[in-house]
Structure formats: structure tokens, C-alpha cells
Amino acid sequence: MLTAFATNAQNATENATQQPPGGGGMILIMYAIIFIVFYFILIRPQKKRQKQLANMIDALQINDEVVTAGGIKGKIASIKEDTVVIETGADKVKIVFEKSAISKVLTIHE
């Protein structure tokens, strides 16, 4: 009787320490699928937008009408390496902005 109890306890311990079949591999596959989904939904479109914005900033020319990130509209009066001078308003007030502050180009002169 005592040996039957010891055998049942040993079997219970062995069953508790065994891992379910395919548990580790399935988790890795699920993580890979989640990463792939995030890449195509979030990462890839963001990189595409950043590339378009960089191309737009590189293509800026004098007399392009632009809108800044703060909502100021005006024409580009001059362009330097990292800055842009914008004329705005009826008085043609000139304001210096970083190129990265340009959010949209309204007209492009070719």
C-alpha cells in the first residue's frame, strides 16, 4: 500500500514537470507573426512618410508656397543649408525657420 502511494506521488511529480508538446516553438512562431504584422502596419508606412517628407524638403525652391508645422503660410524667400526664410502677410514680413518645420508645400515651381 505504501509503495502504491509512493508510485502515485512520483507519477504526479513527473506529470507536473513535463512541458506541453510544442509550447516553446509555438510561442516563437506567434512572436514572429506579431512582429511581421507590426512591421507592415506601423513601421513600414512610417518610414515611407519620413522618406516623402525628406524628399519634399530637399526639393524646396524659392517662391514655393509652404505651410509650417505651426500653421504659418508664406513664400520661400531664400534657402540655406538648414534654414528657410519665409515671406508672409501683406507687409512681406520675413521669418527664418528650420527646414524641418516645413510641413506642406502648396505650390511647386518647376
Image: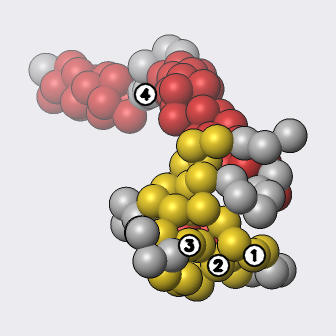
* Residue designated by label 3: 87
Closer to the observer: label 3 or label 2? 3
* Residue designated by label 2: 85
* For marks 2 and 1 on the same chain, the one whose residue lies earlier in the sequence: 1
Residue 23 position within the rendered picture, expressed as x and y whole percent measured from the top left:
48, 23
Q: In the image, which disc is placed on residue 78?
A: 1
Q: Which quadrant, please, contains the C terminus?
A: top right
Q: Is residue 61 visible?
A: yes
Give the quarter of the image for residue 99: bottom right
Query: Callout 2: helix, strand or loop?
Result: strand
* For marks 4 and 1 on the same chain, the one whose residue lies earlier in the sequence: 4
Closer to the observer: label 2 or label 4? 2
Q: Label 2 to label 1, Cα distance in Å?
A: 5 Å
* Residue designated by label 4: 18
Residue 38 position within the rendered picture, expressed as x and y whole percent measured from the top left:
52, 31
Give the quarter of the image for residue 61: bottom right
